[in-house]
Image (cartoon, rainbow, N blue to C red):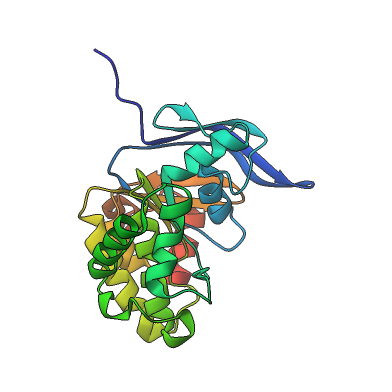
Amino acid sequence: MSQVAPAIEFRKVSKWFGDFRVLSEVDLKIGKGEKVVVCGPSGSGKSTLVRCINQLERHQQGDILLGGTTVAGNAAHIRGIRRRVGMVFQQFNLYPHMTALENCCVAQRLVAWRSRTEAEDVARAYLERVRIADKAGSYPHQLSGGQQQRVAIARALCMQSEVLLFDEPTSALDPEMIREVLDVMVTLAGDGLTMVCVTHEMGFARQVADKIVFMDHGRIVEEGAPSDFFRQQKTDRAREFLAQILH
């Protein structure tokens, strides 16, 4: 009987920035529809791990597979990979001269070759999904940080990708705006998407994650279910990290 390929697989992946080894022989499998939270101290390689999936960062050793297909390749191949992987960044990265609706349409028009009408219909549906349909005509400077991040999530969803990546999506937000973004992410987690989220929001991790990946010094130190990770850490490093972050 043939085995279904994981949604994402890292095989002995290493990455350097100059002489600094930011990822060190990482092995990781993420199943289709699985929700994975990646956590760890600053500089542990979390964001680099996620950014290697869609090749915003290129790894130098090992292999990363998306649905059984290697992500590394020429520019045309990587464009194809990026059509299959949506990403939400720390800093929103919205076009300031475009409305929320236009921000959600531009990639659909240029990458997915949808008509203006189709792109706008899809965009409005996902703006509704993230509870910000009434701001479709607003520009980024007219929106709060939490609203901008919800537009960014809608923009990623509009591409109807197989995988959705989040790189510390609440770290640039004021505390009162974090909850509104996390609430949207919790809702999306019930939709069957494969999600990989770098975050320090441990309440979100407990509620949503199927798997916690704890990193330190470019390595995966612990990996397991939230119930195991929060109740009984296997390493002193994970215990120290949680003691600080949950204090």
Residue 63 coordinates in the image, percent (x, y)? 55, 30
Query: Residue at 21% of width from left, 53% of height from top?
Result: 191
Residue 246 can be seen, yes or no: no
Query: Residue at 32% of width from left, 63% of height from top?
Result: 120
Residue 88 coordinates in the image, percent (x, y)? 45, 61
Query: Residue at 43% of width from left, 46% of height from top?
Result: 85
Nearest the eye: 27 or 139? 139
Nearest the eye: 10 or 246? 10
Q: Quadrant of the N terminus?
A: top left
Nearest the eye: 42 or 106? 106
Relative height, residue 55 to residue 45 (above, below): above
Residue 100 coordinates in the image, percent (x, y)? 40, 73
In the picture, residue 104 is in which quadrant? bottom left
Q: Decide if residue 18 is on the left or right side of residue 247.
A: right
Q: Decide if residue 28 is on the left or right side of residue 180.
A: right
Q: Decide if residue 54 is on the left or right side of residue 23.
A: left
Q: Farthest residue in the top direction? A: 1
Relative height, residue 163 to residue 148 (above, below): above
Residue 129 can be seen, yes or no: yes
In the picture, residue 130 is in which quadrant? bottom left
In the picture, residue 58 is in which quadrant? top right
Q: Quadrant of the C terminus?
A: bottom left
Q: Decide if residue 167 is on the left or right side of residue 57.
A: left
